[in-house]
Amino acid sequence: MNRSLVIPAVCCLGAFAALMATLHGVNGREAAAEFIPLDASVRRADASKANSELLLSTEEAEQALTSLVGEYLRPWRQWETSPHRLYSRVAPRPIPTILAKVEMSPSPNCKSDNFLVAKIDVSTGGKSQLTPCVIDRTTKEVLLFAEGQWLAEDEWLTKAPLP
C-alpha cells in the first residue's frame, strides 16, 4: 500500500476515535445524573405556572413597541427642535410631520400563545406605511416586516428614513 494514503487514513481514524470518545463521555455523564421522577400532573402544573410568569404580557409588549417607535421617531423630533429645521435655504420648506401609532391585535389568530401580533402605522406627510410586527413572548424579541423581509429591532431602526 502506498505510504501517502496510509498516513492520512491513520490520522482520520485517530480523529474519529477521539470524537467518539468525547461523545460517549458526554452521554455517560448525562446518564450518571440523578433522575427523580415526578408525578406528571405536578410537572405540567409547575411548567404552565412558570411559563405564565415568564411570558411577556400584552401591556409590556405594547410598552416595548412604543419605546421602539420613540427611537424610530427620535431623529425627526431632534430635527424639529434644531435651528436647522429647514430643508434648504433657497426654498425653505418645513419638515413633513411624522406620526406613528402602535396597535396590538385584540386576540391572537394563531394557535400558539407564545406570540403576539401588532402593527405600527407610520404616517409621513400624506404617506402612510404599515409595518406588521410579531413579538415572541418568551424571548421578548420583536420582528418587524419591512422592505419585503423580517427585520430585528436594531435592523429596522438603522433602515429608518431620516428627515
Image (cartoon, rainbow, N blue to C red):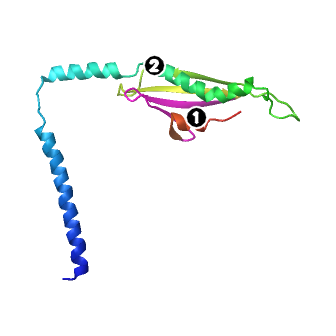
Left or right of 126: which side holds 112? left
Left or right of 5: which side holds 111? right
Looking at this rendering, what residue extends furthest in the bottom direction?
A: 2
Q: Label 2, on which residue?
A: 60
**Residue type highlighted by circle 1:** Leu
**Residue type highlighted by circle 2:** Glu
Asked where in the image residue 9 lies, by quadrant, the reply is bottom left
Q: Label 1, on which residue?
A: 157
Nearer-the-camera pick, 158 or 8: 8
In the image, residue 154 sits, relative to residue 47, either above or below, namely below
Residue stretch rendered in magenta on the structure: 127-148
Mark 1 vs mark 2, CA separation in Å: 20 Å
Tag 2's secondary structure? helix
Nearer-the-camera pick, 39 or 148: 39
In the image, residue 20 sits, relative to residue 41, either above or below, namely below
Crowding near the residue tagged with mark 2, few <14, some 14–19, many ≥20 C-alpha atoms within 10 Å? few
Q: Residue at x 16, y 40 (%)?
A: 30
Left or right of 55: which side holds 159? right
Tag 1's secondary structure? helix
Crowding near the residue tagged with mark 1, few <14, some 14–19, many ≥20 C-alpha atoms within 10 Å? some
